[in-house]
Image: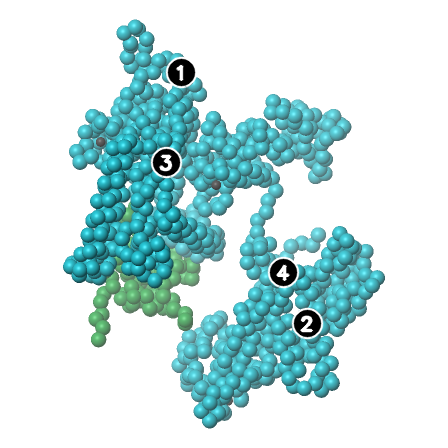
Chain colours: A cyan, B green
Amino acid sequence: MPSPKRIGKIKFGLLSPKEIRTMSVRKIIWADTYDDDGFPYPQGLMDLALGVIDPGLRCKTCDQKAADCPGHFGHIELAKPVIHVGYTRLIRKLLRVTCRACGRLLLSPDEIKKVSITAEDELGGDVLTEKDIKKERSCPHCGEQQLKVNFEKPTTFSEVLLEDGKKNEHKLTPADIRARLERIPDSDLKLLGINPDVARPEWTILTVLPVPPVTMRPSIILENGQRSEDDLTHKLVDIIRINQRFKENQDAGAPQLIIEDLWELLQYHVTTYLDNEVAGCPPARHRSGRPLKTLSQRLKGKDGRFRGSLSGKRVNFSARTVISPNPNLSVTEVGIPLSIAIEMTVPVRVTAYNLEEMREFVLRGPERKSLKVPCGANYVIRPDNRRLRLGGDNLETIAEQIEPGYTVERQLRDGDIVLFNRQPSLHRMSIMAHRIKVMDGKTFRLNPAVCPPYNADFDGDEMNLHVPQTEEARAEAAILVAVQENILSPRFGGPIIGGIHDHISGIFMLTHDLRWFTKSEILYLLKYFEFEHLPEPGKVEEDGTPMWSNKQVFSMILPDGLNMVFRASSCINCDECKYTDCERDAFVRVIDGQLETGTIDKKSIGAFDGAILNRIIRQCGMDRASQFIDDMTRLSIRGIMIDGFSFGIDDEDLSKTEYGQIEDELSKAKDDVDRRIRIFQEGQLEPMPGRTPEETLEMQIMQVLGKARDRTGEIAGRHLGLGNSAVLMAVSGARGSMLNLTQMAGCIGQQSVRGERIMRGYEERTLPHYKRGDRGADAHGFILHSYKSGLSPTEFFFHAIGGREGLVDTAVRTSQSGYLQRRLINALQDLKVAYDGTVRTTMGRIIQFKYGEDGTDPMKGSFGDPVDVKGLVESVLKEEV
Amino acid sequence: MSIRINVLDHVMVPDHQAMSEEEVQALLARYSITFDQLPKVFHDDPGVRQVNGKVGDVVRIIRQSHTAGIAEAYRLVVRRPKK
Ligand SMILES: [Mg+2]
Ligand SMILES: [Zn+2]
Ligand SMILES: [Zn+2]
Ligand SMILES: [Zn+2]
């Protein structure tokens, strides 16, 4: 193998016709590819000199076989020059800044000096622009009057002639343009940022076309034995055919009109050959109607050569499947199907110390019938790097053979560390290291508490898994990437892993108010929690049965010495806080690891909040914190299972009284709206400062209706207490809000587009169901029904309008933020923090003099502050400050 | 006539100071970097113009930081490219 070479420099320029002819090995004149025997035509598009793709044939240029021949360029002599679409903007600029007669820049030496003062550095690209030259002046060198040059996409240039006051467009042929570009002197090109040594402007008009080697446009043979040519070959066939016809007509002295048509056709084919997605040019299509994938399409876009092939990353030792939840796994674990564990391997070097173990792996071989069977091995690598596939009858022989120096590729087993990932990988927590647990089934299993960092749910999401293959990779995974090292998010300096949904409902139901459990109940709750002794019972019943409180149960999973005082999510911020006597039990007080008062909910253990979790991390470290998450999720799941938890359609039912009240409230609001509309129509409405009367009325109506909706929610809320599952979820912060409940049981309320009532539709009305100019509530999207009671047809229509806006917003936001993310990552990906604390590029250029200007890890701060002073003081004083 | 205001007086504009030759040499030595490895600022930046920074000068920018107290940055004045 040849040794890798270092690239000295890369030069960019245009290919000159001379260069194209020099690098060409064959002039191509025939549009045909293969003859009837399937042999390439000489001087056809598949000429053997352009390289070979069929095995067995030899290249006529380099005499190598298909595998070794790199392919060689040929060329087509064009009957007349055509414009290269990629350079139309440059051509336009050059035509506009140079003289149509002498080709010189349309500036006098003095003017040049004035415009380009900064020509000090050679690289200074766009030194002169079109704007620097005044329109339609005469040449300062030869005095020629200049004409306006029009450009029409994709490749048409014309000059505007003024003939007796009339504008007359005169088309420029590529040959005319080429002649003009040829006249531009080298010295003037330098001022335009063009290096004439490598890019003479007339080379942007093609007179000879390179034919790419067959190796980059191989033909494939279909099942039915037919040959199918590459899109590029198809396009080249078109070009050669037209070129041929053009030449024949030219030689026969055809009329100018026909020549012009053919010239345009040739231009079209060359244009689409280079880029089949040019504006103002119908794309060339395959017989089937599919647009052809020509040169530019091979490079552009997500699946193009750059983003798709060159910077595309593909890896081995990876697996992908659907995910599903398993609350009994630790957050640091991931359950993988047996079939994946069998397929994927970890290389282990054989030493004198593990020789026997390795022999056992090899003896077990690649088969593994059930979870209980220990792992086997799939491959053995000999010291000479020969790879032996295990299986069949060779197990014993190879097991005998292995000795220190061999490598055994062992199957995955419980405890192996792997990287787990879900796209789109937007932050570092999108890839975390888990420990494997081999399981039944065909899905990856994970604890629902790690869903927030991955942003995963179980509606069919798939995730990827990667197995590190070296000791260094495993060490990095365990020390830096492990789940417990990523509980805190550098995004806001708080825990991003924590209880969700049922964890929060469960822990809320368990810890709310005071409840007493018997010994068997408390043991049921703590079944998966390891402990040595139960605490002293909180009270003893008259009959002598010892009882433990719900707060005692929760305290068992808390670390000792934990002190915290805060308000739970269920706190409604009363004007006067009753602290520990709060009737909602929302004042949480933890002293010495004992929960004294308060309900545990989203604020304490939820993902993104997790006050208790956060304190445990700071006080006891990451490992204790992940232990706490495991204990908490298991306890809360058992907690929710004591009572059971469900939600059904009749949970949205209210009593007759409430329905009456809601109806009253809504009709009162409607009357109020009508009254205000009357005032407005009588011209009595006092406009608000800076608003028109119409705007004022709109704002008043929105306000009245908004208030009415909220009022119905309050009425519904009065009827539905914590016994209602939806209320419990909203209060504890597990899922949903009181607004959702209001809309289900009370009234859905105003639908809006861009924050305003729905106004669009027909002339002066939204729908033909209403009178023109009706400003009433129902005519502009107010829905007075609830989801439970069902919507009227007009209400349903307005709801669809409001709902669509939300969908469009999300669709637009994701695509925009995706592009922003790509640009940020491309700009930042190679920056690193140097040992002196500076942030630098790979070339040592300084980006920040101190990482983040303060040199601190955002993960280690506290919700934006460097130190959580208040929490620390409270922890010491054991009371609120 | 436009009123010349001192942009540095604005609360949201950090303090700018032109650095002396010796200070710049010390700075380059401290971070063991060459001149062109410094971050850049354009010559017509209002803050730079206020302290009379010329192309090739280094400007010290002193920011108030929520977490670090005071954060200093140094920028090499360069000519703004055309367009
Ligand atoms: Mg999903
Ligand atoms: Zn060859
Ligand atoms: Zn001239
Ligand atoms: Zn309270």
Q: Are marks 4 and 3 on the same chain?
A: yes
Q: Residues within 10 Å of mark 1 (few under 14, many from 20)?
A: some
Q: Tag 1 or tag 2, which sits nearer the N-term?
A: 2
- Residue A740 locus on image (x, y percent): 34, 39
Q: Tag 4 or tag 1, which sits nearer the N-term?
A: 4
Chain holding disc 1:
A
Q: Is A430 on the left or on the right of A357, as rendered?
A: left
Question: Which residue is label 2 attached to?
Answer: A239
Three-letter residue code for mark 2 = Ile
Three-letter residue code for mark 4 = Arg
Q: Are marks 4 and 2 on the same chain?
A: yes
Q: Which mark is residue A523?
A: 1
Look at the numbered discs 4 and 3 and tell me whether their residues touch, using CB distance below 8 Å.
no
Q: Is the shortest distance between ligand 4 and the CB of mark 1 under 8 Å?
A: no
Q: Is A818 on the left or on the right of A767, as rendered?
A: right
Residue A869 seen in render: no
Q: Residues within 10 Å of mark 2 (few under 14, many from 20)?
A: many
Question: Which residue is label 3 attached to?
Answer: A735
Q: Is residue A622 above or below residue A177?
A: above
